[in-house]
Image: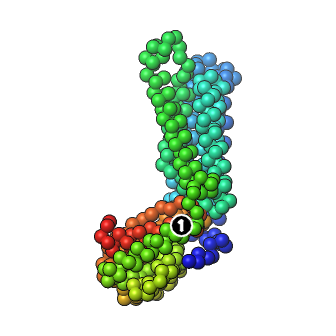
């Protein structure tokens, strides 16, 4: 089985990407970074003495610093909202937005260590995680692999910021006996939130490592193993289809005919496989598979609705009993606001009626996404034929 054409990849133009630099979202991001020194100065410097404001005590100074931190944190939501609502997603914004969060969190943690409020080992764990994840992502980027952020990382950031606010307004050092410290509710809550943040920090780091295990040499599965898996699945699909007396067809976008090629690699497949339609371009989906412009305009090319119409079109044009259709984003470019790289929509149509539709989110580079799509399509074909869903 030949799998060619995966090495030379041209990045697709993202219609949602803008070339403008000074968008409102980017301006908010830069303001957030510029406000970080203001927070640090407000927290650790004796500014009430500088401005001759003796009425502002340390507790009130901490509350003011915490308020500034909350204000800066809220701008993270604001710049994301502006970028999405105005269709002004930029490469500069993608780079600076997560960097601004890391600058804010790192500066706050180091300031708390400087004040003696937070032990240094907490900061060491958090910073070590950032260095490791950044290294993994840079390695992945050099291989053309996009590792999508998981909810672990998002919750990690939220809990870190909440913990920082709590530690800003409450000294974490035990005063008096251990019993008296545990009677301090704010002290307990502060450490509970911080421990949750640390757990999520470690878990999110492991999640990145697991997703990049192929790049790091931690996975034993090879390209040859994947091809063997595809051929084994194809043989099972063909045997099941012969027994059920079903003819098969495919409608493929991102896989470029790989599903049909895998099926026809097996000797005797001509008794089952009617053919395949490679509808890589949107115009071919409309002209050859009868995908309507209304569906494309309403739901987009990467959608279960489009996949379903592709499968129906394949059944009609190929005069087959069962057709599978796939459409998605193999990368490295082309991601959409709600469809990151690795998003694949699939559909099965049997005797003109939709049998199944689903969405998968695959990890890895372009080749890996396409291979996983072939494997999943063959698995679902076999399950549909044998009624094993």
Residue 270 image point, x, y percent: 43, 87
Q: Residue at x 30, y 70 (%)?
A: 387
Residue 284 image point, x, y percent: 50, 84
Residue 361 visible here: yes
Q: Residue at x 64, y 41 (%)?
A: 103
Viewer-proximal residue, 289 or 385? Answer: 385
Query: Mark 1 Cα within 10 Å, few/some/many (few <14, many 20+)?
Result: some
Q: Is residue 158 above or below residue 276?
A: above
Residue 259 image point, x, y percent: 48, 76
The colour style of the image is rainbow
Residue 261 image point, x, y percent: 51, 80
Q: Is residue 247 above or below residue 51?
A: below
* The C terminus sits in image quarter: bottom left
Q: Is 278 situated left or right of 101 in this image?
A: left
Q: Is residue 125 above or below residue 174?
A: below
* The N terminus sits in image quarter: bottom right
The residue that disc 1 covers is 226
Q: Residue at x 31, y 67 (%)?
A: 388
Q: Residue at x 64, y 63 (%)?
A: 144
Residue 23, located in which quarter of the rendered image?
A: bottom right
Residue 109 visible here: no
Q: Is residue 107 above or below residue 55?
A: below
Q: Residue furthest top?
A: 176
Question: Could you tell me which secondary element the residue under label 1 belongs to?
Answer: helix
């Amino acid at each position: 089985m030949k799998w060619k054409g995966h090495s030379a990849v041209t990045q697709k133009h993202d219609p949602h990407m803008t070339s403008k630099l000074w968008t409102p979202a980017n301006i908010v991001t830069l303001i957030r970074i510029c406000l970080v020194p203001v927070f640090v100065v407000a927290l650790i410097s004796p500014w009430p003495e500088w401005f001759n404001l003796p009425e502002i005590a340390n507790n009130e100074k901490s509350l003011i610093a915490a308020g500034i931190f909350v204000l800066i944190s809220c701008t993270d939501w604001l710049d994301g909202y502006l970028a999405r609502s105005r269709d002004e997603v930029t490469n500069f914004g993608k780079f600076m937005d997560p960097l601004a969060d890391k600058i804010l969190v790192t500066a706050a943690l180091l300031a708390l260590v400087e004040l003696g409020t937070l032990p240094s080992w907490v900061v060491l764990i958090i910073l070590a995680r950032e260095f490791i994840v950044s290294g993994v992502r840079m390695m992945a980027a050099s291989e053309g692999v996009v590792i999508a952020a998981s909810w672990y990382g998002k919750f990690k950031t939220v809990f870190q910021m909440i913990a920082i606010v709590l530690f800003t307004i409450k000294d974490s050092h035990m005063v008096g006996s251990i019993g008296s410290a545990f009677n301090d509710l704010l002290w307990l809550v502060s450490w509970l939130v911080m421990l949750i943040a640390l757990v999520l920090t470690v878990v999110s780091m492991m999640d990145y490592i697991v997703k990049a295990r192929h790049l790091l040499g931690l996975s034993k599965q090879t390209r040859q193993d994947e091809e063997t898996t595809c051929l084994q699945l194809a043989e099972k699909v063909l045997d099941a289809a012969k027994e059920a007396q079903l003819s098969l067809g495919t409608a493929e976008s991102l896989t470029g005919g790989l599903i049909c090629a895998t099926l026809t690699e097996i000797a005797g497949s001509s008794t089952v496989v009617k053919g395949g339609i490679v509808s890589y371009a949107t115009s071919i989906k409309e002209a050859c598979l009868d995908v309507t412009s209304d569906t494309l305009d309403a739901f987009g090319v990467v959608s279960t609705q489009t996949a379903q119409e592709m499968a129906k079109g394949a059944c009609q044009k190929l005069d087959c009993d069962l057709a599978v259709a796939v459409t998605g984003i193999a990368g490295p470019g082309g991601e959409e606001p709600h469809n990151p790289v690795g998003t694949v929509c699939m559909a099965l149509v049997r005797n003109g009626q939709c049998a199944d539709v689903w969405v998968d989110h695959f990890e890895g580079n372009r080749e890996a996404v396409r291979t996983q799509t072939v494997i999943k399509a063959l698995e679902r074909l076999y399950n549909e034929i044998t009624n094993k869903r």
